[in-house]
Every structure is written in structure tokens, then in C-alpha cells.
Amino acid sequence: MAHVEPAFQSLIRVGVIGLDSSHTLQFSRRIRDMHARGQTRCRVTGCWDTEANSQTCADAAAALLELGIRSTGSLDELLASVDAAMILTQNGHRHFDLAMKSLNRGLPTFVDKPLSCSAADAAALVQFTRTRAVPCYSASALRFIDELPDFPIGSLGRLESIEVSGPFQEVAQMPGLWFYACHTFELLDSLWDRAGNLRRIRSRVDDTGHRINLEYHDGSSAVIGLDREGVAPFAALLRGEKGSFKFQAGSLTSYDRLVESICRFFESGKPDIPLENTANTIAAIECAERSLSHGGEWITLEGHVASPTHNPGVLVRKK
């Protein structure tokens, strides 16, 4: 990431909404350290959560206070005191409403995974950002893995299929695929710019976990496998006309790169991953959920959430 001298540029005050996720402390620490090194103008200055009385949130608030980040008495108070916001609460069902409160104030807003738990809400966020010109960004750290920047994907020829696998976890707040499967879906979409051209999807559960088949309008296909035990590594197999390539995704630096990307977004107003791409990913997950509820039937996607936007894929992995 390019060196920036905070002393010569105005501070970007970032507010954190949501204290029940491990990302709250991890992201805030990374941004603090980047700011101290002169790598970003951003600094988390305040936080808030409706569930601040829970033990988890109380512990997070105490840890943030040690970083100089104070809790505010209300969301309005937080939003009035910052220049940008991060929606980091774990429950994706809260993301849309919280993001809209921030965006309605004109604040650049990052929304942690998943962007929402509804394709309609994701489409509404896209439409709002288009009509009001307020930037919004959402991405999984799996879009920032280490393995592909130097691999010449073009050497495989036209890609015909991809198999992606990863661990599966579930939480009570977001039953089904929403909590953790979005990582694997976003890994697939970062490898293959077809999220907006999905035709139909089928999800089934067997003894080992979920198997999700995706078919696209151009005749290509993809498979997502989710390990029920939650211990399988993220991995992918790409098949092209001229060859294949298989890799296991590492995550040692992916969160650092995600946080760097968030800071770039707040500084420039331009997300590395267009919101349309993430919204189309949400539509795919919603289709997969519908298939599960219908006994594994094929579900046809009724149009895409937003016009497909070029996905920069590995080009986003800036250091």
C-alpha cells in the first residue's frame, strides 16, 4: 500500500457499528497500526452497538477503549462524529438497516460479510449508491488470498468449470449458508467473473456437508463443497481448455489486505470490488438457500441483482 503522511492530510475518523464480532477488534487494531506507520489517514475513533450490555460487547468495548476508541451513547451520536463507518456486527440480518442509516448521512460505508441476508436488500443498496452517489463496499477476506497474483490464469485457455471448497459454520443469528458460506461463494466469484450471469443453482446436503452446483448462461458450471466439520481448508480447482490448476488458499495476510482495501476505499471513495458484484453473490446464496428449502431442486435465478460489473479478481491484491 502506498505510503501516506497523515500529518499532512486530514484524519479520516472511522466509526465501528457492532461489537459482537472478532473483526471489530482485529480491524480496529490493524487500522491503528497502519495509521501509526503513516500508511493511512484512517483511524477508528468511536464505536456503538445496540447490544452493548451483553458480555461479549462489553468485553469488546473495554478492549477498544484501550486503543483510544470510545463507545457512544447512540448510533446518531456516533454517526455525527465520524467521516466513515464500518458495519461489523456479526448478524447479517442487521446489516441493511445499519448501512442505510450511515449511507443516508452521506458517509462512505463498509459492510462486513455478508452484505445482507436478502437479495432484495442488496439490490436496494446498489440502487441507493447509484442514485445518491454515496459509496458502499463489502467483501470477504477470501477475495485477497495470496496464491493467485503471479499465476497466469490465461494459460489455461477458456475456463470451463471451477470447483471450490471450504469449511462450513452456522450461527443461531444466521442459520443456513449466510454466516460462513459467503466466504466460499466470494472466493468463487473472485476467480471467475460470472456472478451476474448465473442461470440456476442446486444445493444438497450429504454426510460430509453441502454440495452446491451452479450453471451459467454460457454453459459453464461450478461446484461449491462445504465441509460440515468446519475444518477443511479453502481450496479451488480451475479447469480450462488447455489445462487445470489446483491450489489451497492461505489466509495469513488476507485480512491485512482486506483492511488495507477498506482504508483505500475510505480515502478514495472507490471500492476495489464493485458493490454490484457482491450483490450478485448475495443473490446466488439466496438461491442456494431456496434450493435447500425445496429438497435440493434446481432454482432458476430470476434475473441478476445488478448489471454484471467487471470483477478485477486477482488485480485487487495490492500490497
Image: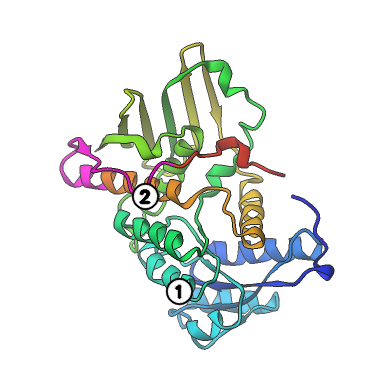
The magenta segment: 289-308
At x 48% / y 23%, what residue is drawn?
Answer: 238
What residue type is disc 1 on? Asn
Q: Position of residue 318 (x, y in %)?
A: 68, 43
Q: Which residue is more in the foreground, 283 or 202?
A: 283
Residue located beneath label 2 in the image: 282
Whether residue 55 is visible to the viewer of this picture, yes or no, is: yes
Disc 1 vs disc 2: which is toward the camera? 1
Cβ atoms at labels 1 and 2 below 8 Å apart: no
What residue type is disc 2 on? Ile
- Is 242 positioned to the left or the right of 292 in the image? right
Q: Earlier in the sequence, mark 1 or mark 2?
A: 1
- For the stretch drawn in magenta, what is the main secondary structure? loop
Q: Is residue 302 magenta?
A: yes
Residue located beneath label 1 in the image: 104
Q: Residue furthest front?
A: 131
